[in-house]
Image (tube, rainbow, N blue to C red):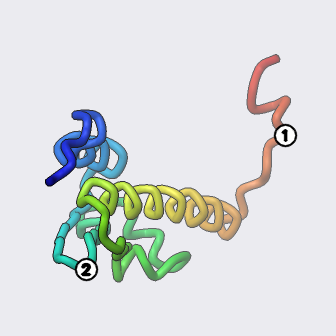
Amino acid sequence: MTEILPAERGLEAMIARFKQALPGWWYSLGECEKSCDASCGPTRDSDDLALIPHDERFNSGFHCDLPQPSTLAEALDVVREEALSARFIAQRRASIANGARRVSPKKRFKL
């Protein structure tokens, strides 16, 4: 019997979350008796391609293979989280490489 996921955890909801978090990115999904798979990456029109020098996955893509039992929504969520984390780290590396100075927390936020 196939488990019915709540709407907020289903595939359509996860695709909407993915598109909101990573606009201009492609994704692909696949499923077999062994695993649920997802891949994603920035399209050629995405500003995130500038992060390739800081992380090659912005060129080759982010991938996961979740062993069964799993869902396509879970696989897409894993690559979405992986891509968001990598983007945060790569943006920090790019900022440091460009000579950006760190701002103290007190200057960032008016207390």
| The N terminus sits in image quarter | bottom left
State which quarter of the image contains the C terminus: top right
Residue at 40% in and 73% down: 58
Numbered disc 2: secondary structure: loop
SS at circle 1:
loop
Rendered position, 111 above or below 48: above
Farthest residue to the top: give it. Answer: 111
Query: Where is residue 104 drawn, in percent x and y?
Result: 84, 40
Q: Is residue 99 left or right of residue 59?
A: right
Q: Amino acid at mark 2?
A: Lys
Q: CA distance from mark 2 to mark 1?
A: 49 Å
* Vertical side of 88 occupied by 65: above or below: below
Which label was assigned to residue 104? 1
Cβ atoms at labels 2 and 1 below 8 Å apart? no
* Residue at the disc numbered 2: 34
Q: Amino acid at mark 1?
A: Ser
* Along the viewing direction, whichever of 87 and 77 lies nearer the viewer: 77
How many C-alpha atoms fall within 10 Å of the one at disc 2: few (<14), some, or many (≥20)? few
Residue 92 % position (x, y): 64, 60
Seen at 19% across and 43% down, the residue is 4
Q: Position of residue 14 (x, y in %)?
A: 27, 46
